[in-house]
Image (spheres, grey):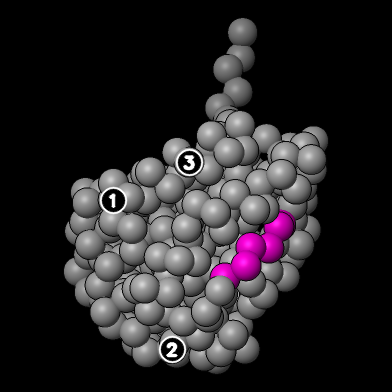
Amino acid sequence: MTALGFLYPGHSAEDDYPRMEQMLGSDVRLQVVHTDIGEDAHRVDALLEMGSPKRLAAGVEELRLSGAEAVVWACTSASFVFGWEGAHDQVRALARAAGLPASSTSFAFAHAVREVGATRVAIAATYPQDVAAHFAAFLGAAGIEVVSTRGSGIITAAEVGTWGWEEVKAMALAGDHPDAEALLLPDTALHTAAYVSDLEKEIGKSVLTANQVTVWEALRLASRRVNAPTLGALFTKEPLVQVKG
């Protein structure tokens, strides 16, 4: 069994994780520990506090006791707002506190874009435009070309957590760009686990969403690959070629 740990801010779309555990259909366990978010606001000052070392460290011991092999800070905005170097510092501090390989959703997106073979992406974000621009800058620092960035102006994770298929689809369609090879939906407060495959059919390209890439990143840290097409192109690996002797 592979046990993976996630520090998840507050309560919004954490039910995506047991859903994805079922969709993976293997011996993978996803352990979610909730962190105290402080003020629920997609504002840079609030996000810097949400992702502060003391808030992340508070949940680490519970994850260690769960037997997790790796830990991911399951938050995009409260990782990329620290900038490329600051987000690295955040992950390094988390790894030291946990004594485990660690990452964050922002780095998960950077790695997942490469995994699906994309170099140009579009961002369809729930955030206000200024916060979404920080994500575009983060991806730029990772060497990824962002061809368009669309914010939706939603301030709280609580509101984002109420969105269903119609709202998610509308945001994705509005935020796509013909030059993009992949579409990114960066907010772990957004329910997307049930929608990724349908979104890819609607959009006609790889769709990467926050909770989806977060789980994929944890599997990557644990050196596991799982074929789960219902979670989109990111979870579709080439079949092994059988070599006949």
Residue situated in front as seen by the camera: 229 or 13: 13
At 46% across and 81% down in the image, what residue appears? Answer: 41
User: For the residue carrying disc 1, how many other residues have a C-alpha within 10 Å: few (<14), some (14-19), or many (20+)?
Assistant: some
Region of the chain picked out in magenta, as a range: 32-37
Choose top left, top right, bottom left or bottom right for residue 88.
top left
Q: What's the CA distance linking mark 1 and mark 3?
A: 15 Å
Nearer to us: label 1 or label 3? 3
- Mark number displayed over residue 93: 3
Asked if the residue under mark 3 is in contact with the one under mark 2, i.e. CB atoms within 8 Å, the reply is no
Q: Amino acid at mark 3?
A: Ala
Residue situated in front as seen by the camera: 49 or 41: 49
Q: Which residue is mark 2?
A: 154
Establish if 128 lies above or below 199: below
Nearer to us: label 2 or label 3? 3
Q: Amino acid at mark 2?
A: Ile
Tell me which label, 1 or 3, sits earlier in the chain.
Answer: 1
Choose top left, top right, bottom left or bottom right for residue 68.
top right
User: For the residue carrying disc 2, how many other residues have a C-alpha within 10 Å: few (<14), some (14-19), or many (20+)?
Assistant: some
Q: Secondary structure at mark 3?
A: helix
Residue situated in front as seen by the camera: 148 or 202: 148
At 58% across and 38% down in the image, what residue appears? Answer: 97
Asked if the residue under mark 1 is in contact with the one under mark 2, i.e. CB atoms within 8 Å, the reply is no
Q: Which residue is mark 1?
A: 84
Taking the image as drawn, is residue 129 in sight?
Answer: yes
